[in-house]
Amino acid sequence: MAIPIVFEEPKRRKRVPSYLVYETLNGKPLYYKGYKDVLSGKKTAAEIMGSSSLQAAIVTAIVMFIGRTINRKRYLVFQMNPAFMSIMGVTFRTT
């Protein structure tokens, strides 16, 4: 009795376009959240990245208000979400 031999081709990874890379950290790309939905065609690239003009205006208004009301000698106000920052030897972590 002969046993059929089936050869499967290895699955090839889809190459991720550079516009879906948020930044590169230690040589490894960090992709936008939802990049797999863009590759599968469920969403467009514009839907997963960037801020709308309304969102940018709201964030700016909030940051300006907070900047006027807090003690700026004691606190720093960031407009966006820095994952890791080091300023003048002081380390700030947001996670």
Image: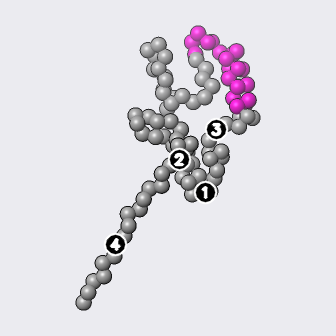
| Residue located beneath label 4 in the image | 7
Extent of the magenta region: 56-75
Q: Position of residue 48 (x, y in %)?
A: 62, 45
Closer to the chain start, of discs 3 and 4, is 4
Query: Mark 3 or 1 closer to N-term?
Result: 1
Q: SS at mark 1?
A: loop
Asked whether 40 or 88 is in front, the reply is 40
Question: Which residue is outermost to the top?
Answer: 73
The picture places residue 25, in percent across and down from the top left corner, at 44, 34
65 in relation to 19, above or below: above
Residue type (three-letter) at the residue carrying disc 2: Pro
Instruction: Specify few, some or many for label 1: CA neighbours under 10 Å numbering under 14, 14-19, or 20 or more.
Output: few
Q: Position of residue 50 (x, y in %)?
A: 64, 38
Residue type beneath disc 4: Phe
Q: Which is more N-terminal, label 2 or label 4?
A: 4
Distance from disc 3 to disc 1, alpha carbons, whole Å, reads 18 Å
Q: Amino acid at mark 3?
A: Gly
Earlier in the chain: of badge 1 and badge 4, it is 4
Name the residue beneath numbered marker 1: 41
- Answer left or right for 86 relative to 66: left
Q: Is residue 79 above or below residue 52?
A: above
Q: From mark 3 to mark 2, how far is it between C-alphas?
A: 16 Å
* Horizontal and vertical percent position of residue 52: 71, 37
**Disc 2 on helix, strand or loop?**
loop
- As helix, strand or loop, the secondary structure at mark 3 comes to loop
Q: Nearer the viewer, mark 1 or mark 4?
A: 4
Q: Are marks 2 and 1 in contact (CB under 8 Å)?
A: no
The correct choice, above or below, for 94 with respect to 86 in the image is below
The residue lying at 69 percent from left, 15 percent from top is 69
Q: Which mark is residue 17?
A: 2
